[in-house]
Image (tube, grey):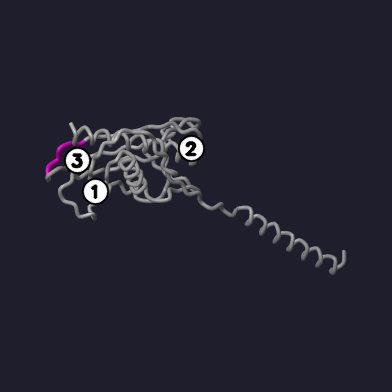
Amino acid sequence: MSLSHLGHGVIAFFFGGLLMLLGGCAGTVTAPKQSYDFGAFQQAAVPDTRLQVILAEIQTTPALDSNAMLYRLNYANGQQLQPYAQARWSMPPAQLLAQRLRQQFAARGSLLGSPADGVDNLPLLHLELQEFSQIFTAPERSHAQLSLHAVLVKNRRIIAQGNFVRQTPSATQDAAGGAQAMQQAADRLSTDLLDWLNSQLHP
């Protein structure tokens, strides 16, 4: 083989390898993250409660103070929260929940205000968000779990407190299924909370 043929072979090999490398890089480009929220609020026929309550800023744990969509593998290590790599909430869970609560209140003829409204004589609701994750009990089975602790204050006195938990099965074992299940859990827990407030303030 002549040197010229050898040179052409080396060049062809070099460019072939370069094209393969570039193709490999293009194939490993990560897909954009999917953003989820609770969707459009569907107002159902519900009785009016006519409540007026101020919602303090919802407290939460450091793990929930971000847009990450979290899950637990209870069948492997239920003490470890893990984030989905390519999915996230449109806003932190506490903000999503506060938004849904206000929508639920409005649907039932009630007002859920904020401290910025400057109203001092209304009952004050403190919420601590404790769990907001998709929990896998097996690779083919999971549910959204939402739990919080509520404290109701009136005239600077604690008049009631309670714990609220909702678990909703996920239709699919992925971020989309978890987001849909969490929206359903949030709607049901919002109703639970509103009924509880009504029983405390309108016994």
The secondary structure that dominates the magenta segment is strand
Q: How dense is the environment of label 2, judged by Cα within 10 Å: few (below 14), some, or many (20 and up)? A: some
**Pointer 1 and pointer 3: residues touching (CB < 8 Å)?**
no
* Res. 177 mark: 2
- Quarter of the image with the C terminus in it: top left
Check residue 110 in the rendering and tell me which mark sits there, or answer none.
none
Q: Give the labeled residue for mark 3.
A: 152
Numbered disc in front, either 2 or 3:
3
**Residue 66 drawn at (x, y percent):** 37, 51
Q: Quadrant of residue 159?
A: top left
Q: Position of residue 170 (x, y in %)?
A: 46, 33
The quadrant where residue 42 appears? top left
Q: CA distance from mark 2 to mark 3?
A: 33 Å
Which comes before the other along the chain, label 1 or label 3? 1
Could you tell me how far apart the alpha carbons at marks 1 and 3 are, in whole angstroms? 10 Å
Q: Mark 2–mark 3 contact, CB under 8 Å?
A: no
Secondary structure of residue under mark 1: loop
Q: Amino acid at mark 3?
A: Leu
| Residue with the most extreme right position | 1
Relative placement, left or right, of 143 versus 160 is right
In the image, which residues are magenta? 157-161
Q: Nearer the viewer, residue 73 or 95?
A: 95
Q: Residue at x 39, y 40 (%)?
A: 133
Q: Is residue 29 above or below residue 109?
A: below
The circle drawn on residue 56 is: 1
Q: Name which residue lies at 29% across and 36% down.
A: 48
Task: Pick the quarter of the image with the N terminus.
Answer: bottom right
